[in-house]
Image (cartoon, rainbow, N blue to C red):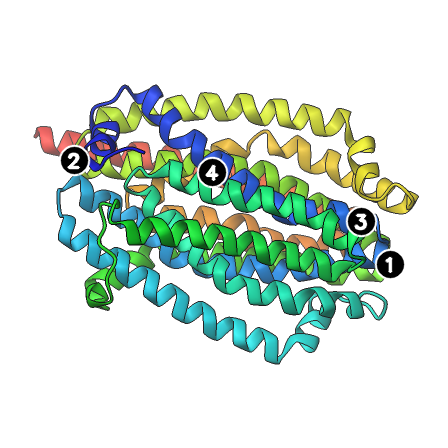
Amino acid sequence: MKSNTDRIYLLEEEKVPKALLTLGIPTMIGMMVSALYNLIDAFFVGQLGTAQIGAVSVVYTLGVILLGIGLLFGSGASSYLSRLLGQKLYKEASDCASTALITSVGVGSVIILLLLVFLTPILRLLGATDTILPFAKEYAVIFIIGLVFNVFNITVNNIITAEGASMISMIAMLSGGIANIIFDPVLIFGFHMGVKGAAIATLIARIISFVIYLTYLLSGKSIFKFKIGNWKPSKVVYSEIFKIGIPMLVFQLLSSLTLGITNSLAARYGDAAVAALGVVARIMNLGGMIIFGFLKGYQPFVGYNFGANHSERVEEATKTILKWGMVFCIATATILVVCRIPIMESFSKNDEMVVSIGSRALIANALVFIGMAYQVLHGTRFLALGKAKQGGMISIGRQGAFFLPLVFLLTAIFDLNGLILAQPVSDICSILMVVILVQRDKKDVLIALNHNCE
């Protein structure tokens, strides 16, 4: 385990490619495993039937909402913490970290309680049909309880990543993911618990991750000092957290709304459409989370070096990540297109409609996935530098400003095919917007440099 001095050296002096790999690979593995939670559930539940996998697809939306709360405080604090560490303001960083964690768990607990109280109408709103609803309720109650631990895990994950403790994040998420893989088939099939078994497996996995994170925080090995007394809900701290965190929260809420609307519209075409698009959403989410995961290592590196006025390291890191990201996206898109049929059959081999709808959706989403690294990289860069306006526009554009009008328009014109095309078309619009924002940012930087020279 790295000492605090080693982590600072990694952020400030280590060669850029090596630093990015050291920070990015553990967070990438951790985020990938985290995304596998729901994909694994979908895989095993898919063996039970179309209604059951449809139930998991509907409830998945609720997890996205609470992920947003964790990111609001965790990712929001992470950007600020990296810059504080770059300025050697360690006391202020500890106060910020403690405030973010305590507030996150408090807000998350209130939302979880409301979800449990109004569960049935919420599931209906998210697209649960009469055949899906009983399984969705059975899965949701346990799944939602587990979200208490997940809010804590996500917040801590982002906070300690800011100090370069990416290995702890990987261990925590990897341990939870392995537990989920083991307990899913045992509880679903071995103990004949069905969808309830999948929910319990996810709960166990999240508790395991929670214990690992809590042990690290209590060990005193973190640069940040987590204490109740460090909870200082000041205007300065919350404004810095919300400046970056709110765009992340809005993105997650819009993602949840997107999934809910997609499920609701898909319900018009039957359970097979709900199940197929739900599976595709998880598959594409896995690819996206791998990119997000690697960029979680990039973000503290950029934030720290920006705070320390090492602009050349920021620029080199951005160019390096973009090259790596494009290679990954092209390779992933190729695999998804070529292997679309066996991929979908692994989730629902006995339902030809699920395979047919899912295969078409995979092709459409895979083709635009090629540009995912570009838009996510620059969104992360803007947020890491504290440029909330540009980062927020990128976060909101893909799932909100573009998707919401397109999904209704395209579905009205092309029916199910329009629903399948809505997300890919909104991704294309988002990529074009990112290109414009990046070019404008370059012009602003050049103007500022010329002004300083004068």
Give the x, y percent position of residue 299: 35, 38
Q: Which residue is mark 1?
A: 270
Which label sits in the foreground, 1 or 4?
Answer: 4
Give the x, y percent position of residue 375: 48, 37
**Which residue is at the far left?**
454
Question: Amino acid type of disc 2?
Answer: Ala
Give the x, y percent position of residue 376: 47, 38
Dot 3 crowding, Cα within 10 Å, few <14, some 14–19, many 20+: many
**Of the image marks 2 and 1, the number of the one nearer the N terminus:** 1
**Of the image marks 2 and 3, the number of the one nearer the N terminus:** 3
Q: Quick one: quadrant of the N terminus?
A: top left
Question: Amino acid type of disc 4?
Answer: Gly
State yes or no: discs 4 and 2 in contact (Cβ < 8 Å).
no
**The disc label shown at residue 46, or none:** 3
- Element type where label 4 sits in the image: helix
Residue 410 visible: yes
Give the x, y percent position of residue 409: 71, 55
State yes or no: discs 4 and 3 in contact (Cβ < 8 Å).
no
Residue 423 visible: no
**Of the image marks 1 and 4, the number of the one nearer the N terminus:** 1
- Element type where label 1 sits in the image: loop
**The disc label shown at residue 308, or none:** 2
Q: Residue at horizontal 16%, vertical 29%?
A: 450
Q: CA distance from mark 4 to mark 2?
A: 24 Å
**The disc label shown at residue 293, or none:** 4
User: Is 187 positioned to the left or the right of 33 in the image?
Assistant: right
Image: 90 above or below 246: above
